[in-house]
Amino acid sequence: MIDSARFLRQCLLANDPTESPAASVAIDSGMADYVRLQQRLMLATLAVSLVAVLIALVGFDAIVASSLLVGSCAGVLYLRLLARSVARLGGGSRQVGRFQLVVPVLLVVAAAKLPQLEILPAFIGFLLYKPALILQTVIDG
């Protein structure tokens, strides 16, 4: 009985795709692709945010532009926290963390309390990671 359990365990370990060298190379390659995608997405988000802040600075006043800048910084922070949470999925974690949801809440509260910030431009700035994500999808497509 003990020998059959040991044999079954050896068979299961032999068929485990995470134990084979080819699978570990594929996982490493996949993580490298994910890191490159993260970097491209961050750069695209920063570029879209910079263009939007410059347009707001020319077309509107400095308060709108600064609110947009603060919101886009919050969006980049949210995106970074989300990426870190997704990267942990392969390890021991089975679900995406919820800590990144604090970022938009704090942004809205700060924009409501501080007279130097306006809520709508700050929230639009926060959402600027989405056009960057769409832009990245079109470029990769």
Image: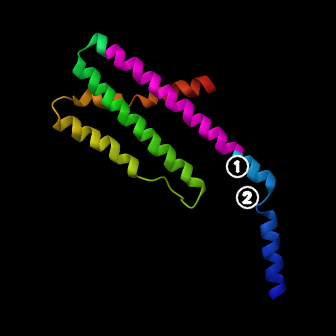
Most foreground residue, 84 or 15: 84
State the residue position of label 1.
Answer: 27
28 or 1: which is nearer to us?
28
Q: Residue 73: where, in percent of width, then height?
A: 37, 33
Look at the image and give the residue range highlighted in magenta.
Answer: 29-56
Query: Residue 135 location, x and y as percent?
Result: 53, 24
Instruction: Please state the total of marks drawn on the protein image.
Output: 2
State the image coordinates of residue 8 (x, y, percent, origin top left): 80, 76
Residue 107: quarter of image? top left
Res 7 → quadrant:
bottom right
Q: Is residue 119 magenta?
A: no
Q: Can residue 55 be seen from the camera position used here?
A: yes
Q: At x 49% / y 50%, what residue is drawn? A: 85
In the figure, residue 52 lies in which quadrant?
top left
Kindly identify the residue that appears in the image at 61 percent across and 40 percent down.
34
Where residue 89 appears, as percent x and y from the top left, is 56, 54
Task: Say the numbered circle drawn on residue 18.
Answer: 2
Quarter of the image with the C terminus is top right
55 w.r.t. 107: above or below: above
* Residue 141 in view here: no
Q: Main secondary structure of the magenta part?
A: helix
- Residue depicted at x 73% and y 58%: 18
Q: Is residue 23 left or right of residue 39?
A: right
| Disc 1 element | helix
Question: The disc labelled 2 sits on which kind of residue?
Answer: Thr
